[in-house]
Amino acid sequence: MNATPSPAAASLEWGHGKKVLDVFLEPTCPYSGRAFAKLDALLARAGEDRLTIRIRLQSQPWHMFSPVTTRAILAAATTEGGREAARRVMAAIYAHRDEFEPTDHCQGALLEQSPGKILARIEAHSGVALRAAFEQSALTQTVKWHARYARQNGIHVSPSFVVDGLLVADMGSADDIDTWLQKIGLAG
């Protein structure tokens, strides 16, 4: 199995430190959104020279538009804006979660939406043109890489945190940044 990510998968990385934190996020999960919102502050506190944060996407089937939102984020990473465009797309999805996830995962007006309409809504909220990048057939390999990588690492829920290749099962989105730094091994 290919452990080397595609350029789009590899681009979802910030910092350049020796300590590596893989954060597995689902694009419409509220807990993943809470974790995502803390990543910039975590990197600032840890220091870009001490920590590398890599976002890995963990699409989950009970989140109805998870495959569309996941592919949109990865498509954004292939645009001229690269990882920052992907970050804007993620932030837009998390900020407007109720427009991308049906009530109780299975009810409401969103059931009448198509993937194309969801993609257009993501473009409108993020300001990132995605359609051409989204339709790249090569992007399918990147989506598959994220799914395989999560499976290889035993990831089943989001958010999940892997430090230097080891799952930290007691690290969660409700933890404060000081607790994260301690669990990552960068406290003090």
Image (tube, rainbow, N blue to C red):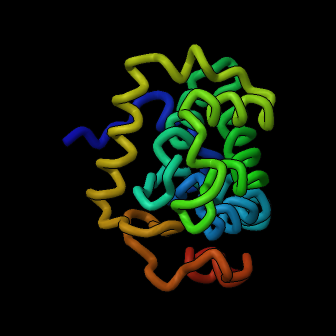
Q: Nearer the viewer, residue 16 or 152?
A: 152
Q: Is residue 163 visible?
A: yes
Percent coordinates x, y for residue 38 in the rendering = 74, 65
**Residue at the left extreme of this rendering:** 1
Percent coordinates x, y for residue 175 in the rendering = 67, 82
Q: Nearer the viewer, residue 32 or 62?
A: 62
Q: Is residue 21 visible?
A: no
Percent coordinates x, y for residue 104 in the rendering = 57, 68
What is the total number of numbered labels drawn onto the structure image? 0
Q: Nearer the viewer, residue 165 or 16?
A: 165
Quadrant of the drawing holding the C terminus: bottom right
Quadrant of the drawing holding the N terminus: top left
Residue 123 placement, left or right of 65 = right
Residue 112 placement, left or right of 170 = right
Residue sitting at x 80%, y 37%: 125
Residue sitting at x 67%, y 62%: 33
Percent coordinates x, y for residue 8 in the rendering = 50, 30
**Residue 79 lies in quadrant:** top right
Residue sitting at x 38%, y 63%: 165
Residue sitting at x 53%, y 47%: 65
